[in-house]
Image (cartoon, rainbow, N blue to C red):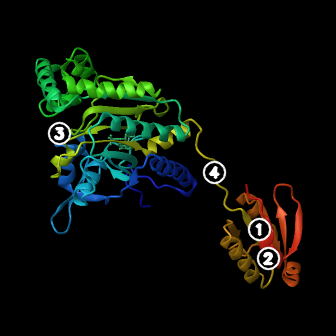
Amino acid sequence: MIQAIRGTKDILPSEIENWYFLENIFRSVSDTFGYKELKTPIFEKTEVFSRGIGDGTDIVNKEMYTFDDRGGESLTLRPEATAALVRSVIQNKLANAGTAQKFWYFGPFFRYERPQKGRLRQFHQYGAECLATDKPESDVEVILLANSIIKKAGISDYKLLLNSLGNDSSRAEYRKALIEYLENKKEQLSEDSQSRLQINPLRVLDSKDKRDIDIVKDAPILSNYFDEESKNHFTIVTSMLDNLGVQYEISPKLVRGLDYYSHTVFEFQSSALGAQDSFGGGGRYNKLFSELGGKDTPAVGFAFGVERLLLILEELKLLPEAKTDCDIFIVAAGDGIQNYSFKIAQELRDSGLRVAVDLNDRSMKAQMRASNKSGAIFTILIGEDELNNNTVTIKNMGDSTQVNIAYNELSNFTFNIA
Ligand code: AMP
């Protein structure tokens, strides 16, 4: 038997309603915030991600699905959306300085990671980006958007971790101090952190390796290196969140994996998830546009992992009730009856009802059983009598009452489908 690729998953009919449940929330909440959907292709030129995300990151170094196409061009299945979205915004000239442009996206992403619960090689993200403003108010707005989605999905027990990476010059000062501190203890660091030390030293701060955690405990603190601009930006963000009653925890070691962040970074965590407890995150990225050849355009955004949101909903028993197979099941047996039952089915479907008919030429009894199993609210019974008299018998499956009505009356009949 041919199996699906490791780390990929079929979304089965029994699960699809859960996806629609979230997708509807993504769409409707984004709309209330005035964010517009933008869909980029699944693959891009590799440089979109290697330049955009940064050469020192795990994503670019270890996790990208990169291949040469038949024309010899290096292409990559998108591992995240932001760099691709920025490429699209530059190419389609969608950003105007001085006016915030707001976009959202939803779709599959690809990373060559070690699969485990909540970690896949093809996974889905919903995310939003607010472009062309460097104001802290826009950081607050995207956090509020994320929060509204979580709340609308019914999740109340989660943590919002918040940190600031400061502006470029503050971070450059800090970087020097951090490298100096870590160089002195290089031998005690994990192998990964030793190799990251010069390229991406901030990543050492959020390493999960015990050796690194011990050393990071006494590392210099980023916020001590903040200049006025860095301090002001973050103060506005936190005081607005305080005023709006948004709960958060300051997490000084939160740096997030990607090179392009500055100022505000944040992450959402849920204890319902186990080891992979982060279900979303984001931050401000002011340099990405210029890295990708566009005009300097400050921006802020975030992404949720949709499979992880679904795991939380499942764990907290918040998934929507499964949909029934149909509203009305037509039980019809007898010679020449199918034309009649199909005609009725079609008319009812045209009026918006969900109607199933038997496709296996089964006995009346077997069809009745199938109707029961389908969860139909009404069964329409058609036998010889109904066919000869041009009537139908409608059975209410809830209270088992039955009425026989003329075919002509069917369009006036009120099917009470809750
Ligand atoms: P990132 O783009 O790495 O900031 O990830 C944002 C969110 O996407 C994470 O918080 C996860 O919920 C989700 N995510 C990232 N990588 C994976 C993966 N390999 N499998 C499933 N979800 C993922």
The answer to whether residue 363 is visible is no
- Please state which amino acid type lies under the numbered disc 4: Ala
Foreground of the two, 108 or 194: 108
Distance of label 1 from label 2 (alpha carbons)? 9 Å
The mark lying in front, picked from 2 and 4, is: 4
Q: Are marks 2 and 4 in contact (CB under 8 Å)?
A: no
Q: Which residue is mark 3?
A: 56
The mark lying in front, picked from 4 and 1, is: 4
Question: Which numbered dot is residue 367?
Answer: 1
**Mark 4 or mark 1, earlier in chain:** 4
**Mark 3 or mark 1, earlier in chain:** 3
Q: Which residue is mark 2?
A: 333
Q: Are marks 4 and 3 in contact (CB under 8 Å)?
A: no
Question: Whole-percent x and y of residue 113?
Answer: 31, 44
The answer to whether residue 278 is visible is yes
> Is ligand 1 closer than 8 angstroms to the Cβ of mark 1?
no
> Is ligand 1 closer than 8 angstroms to the Cβ of mark 3?
no
Foreground of the two, 339 or 104: 104
Foreground of the two, 312 or 260: 260
Check disc 3 and report its element: helix, strand or loop.
loop
Q: Residue at x 46, y 50 (%)?
A: 31
Q: Quadrant of the C terminus?
A: bottom right
- Graded by Cα atoms within 10 Å as few (under 14), some (14 to 19) or many (20 or more), the crowding at tag 4 reads few
Query: Is residue 227 depicted above or below 405 in this figure?
Result: above
Q: Which residue is mark 4?
A: 322
